Amino acid sequence: MEGSRLEKLKKLRERNLAYPHKFEVSHQIGDIRDKYEKPTDGKEVSVKGIAKRVSKLEKGYLVRLSDASGVEILAITEQELQAGKEYTLRGKLDRYEGKLCLFFAVPTQENNSLDIQSLKAEYDLEPNFEEVSVAGRLITLRSMGKAIFGHLQDATGRIQIYVKADLIGEEAFKDFEDLVDLGDIIGVKGKLFRTKTGELTVEVESFSLLSKSLHPMPEKWHGIKDVEVRYRQRYLDLIANEHARKIFILRSKVIQEIRNFLNSEGFLEVETPILQHVASGANAKPFITYHNYLEQNLYLRIAPELYLKRLIVGGFNRVYELGKNFRNEGVDTTHNPEFTMVEFYAAYWDYEDLMNFTERLLSHVLLNTLGTLKISYRGKELDFTPPYKRYKYFDLLEEKTGKDKDFFLRDVEGLREFAKKIGVPKAESLTHAKLIDKVFDMLVEDELWGPCFVLDFPKILSPLAKSHRKDPDLVERFELFVAGKELANAYTELNDPEDQKERFLEQLKEKEMGDEEAMSMDEDFITALEYGMPPTGGEGIGIDRLVMILADVDSIREVILFPALRR
């Protein structure tokens, strides 16, 4: 801890000013901005003014464009402009760090440009010295003699504060100068006004130091780039990176809209055990723990599926659960050992119903979070407008390999040699099911930009899915792929208890052959099916991967607040 900060904290404690119990906040910062800053909606405009200052950004230049009276607007341009020279700039109107700004600005010779003052008057409403009380972390600080400017930031935004000695008093001003540091959390009370440059500002009449930051913020902490710092100290990432905050706000909205849609469609949200007696419901290696009182091993759930289907047996016709699953697998850009899924089951549906429902669900989520069905991911367009394309599993494999369904299902050694040839790791020891799965992963998945449904999977890969009504080698199952990533897995559920028991026995054989991810037998689930489960469709959607796509990030760690890391 920095010595001088500790000394300041000591002084605060001596005066009984350290860590007060509460502070009355009248507004979140974002609420103030929403009230006095009109949305720009990306309107394209031309503005004339003098380039008062030109600063280099990581990409392009930030220009302070001023009119003759000193009223300013910002512009971000790829072209370096000359300070002091008059320009007419055309660009898309938005906000940069809370200030009106022309993005993608380019010089133009247009004569019908707008003047800065009238433009700002339209979008920056006057607060008329409204009394406010706000709190947040102090993220900028600059002293100008008897006045201090800074910015407070909370989860909803940032706002400028203006501290004057002749307004708060010499003693309080000296306390601010002597005791307050960057990174401290403070509360201020005062009046809202706009500066000459048009920035929304609180003229401080009193302040409280609410929590002392005993560590200085990282150098250039307005946008931490070091991923180790960002993931291990997520609190610093959230303080410093607006983009990170937006991702997790988006994640929360996505989850809320999924719940809203399912609830509106008559689904009941339920909770099932995380500690389970049998590791089943998906193909995955489980985490094992020991329960002292029960004197037995338990497993962190790899899926809630078998419990949710028990509820269908019990008479709840539409159920869902949104929560964590745990799989003892590797960590990469699309896998984390604990992850969030929503699984939902509807009696009397099949996988065709689920495909249509999935299109409606995702349309609802995108429209209510992003306001559009067309988004950009990694520089390429994704269009979620229904209907999505549909491809059959073995048609895709045959297109890539020239080999038909019989080759993959009946020529195991030929398949093994083919897998070796294309570089599937450990192909010589993989089970038949794993060979098919790995070949598909390697040759097909990355090219499924989508969104698209891949349907009619081989039965050998799908122990919980109902046999296809037209082909006994297949099951009625689909996976939804978007940008080369599996986003959802669904099927017409197997509800024949004898068939299900045989499938579990096949899985046990796979486990004996070395497949650690094969399912275990769940005798109680078989008993539940023997009481009768209606025809049912069930689906699981990966929340983390969905948010990755909507937030346009390429690593699952970007959308999980505290991802798994080595110590």
Image (spheres, rainbow, N blue to C red):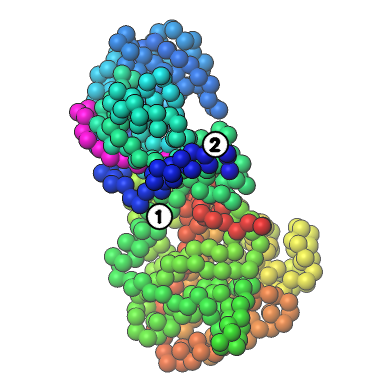
**Does the rendering let one see residue 223?**
no
Is residue 226 shown above or below 190? below
Q: Residue at x 22, y 35 (%)?
A: 131
The x and y percentages for residue 211 are 43, 45
- Per the image, is 523 magenta? no
Amino acid type at circle 2 is: Ser
Extreme residue in the front direction: 14
Q: Nearer the viewer, residue 353 or 7?
A: 7
Q: Residue at x 58, y 34 (%)?
A: 219
The x and y percentages for residue 266 are 29, 71
Is residue 469 shown above or below 185? below
Q: On the rendered image, what quadrant is the C terminus found in? A: bottom right
Is residue 433 shown above or below 390? below
Residue range of the region highlighted in magenta in the rendering: 124-137
Q: Classify mark 1: helix, strand or loop.
A: helix
The x and y percentages for residue 320 are 39, 71
Q: Nearer the viewer, residue 482 or 247?
A: 247
The x and y percentages for residue 510 are 68, 79
Query: Which residue is the site of mark 2?
Result: 4
Q: Classify mark 2: helix, strand or loop.
A: helix
Q: Is residue 198 left or right of residue 563?
A: left
Residue 252 shows which numbered tag?
1
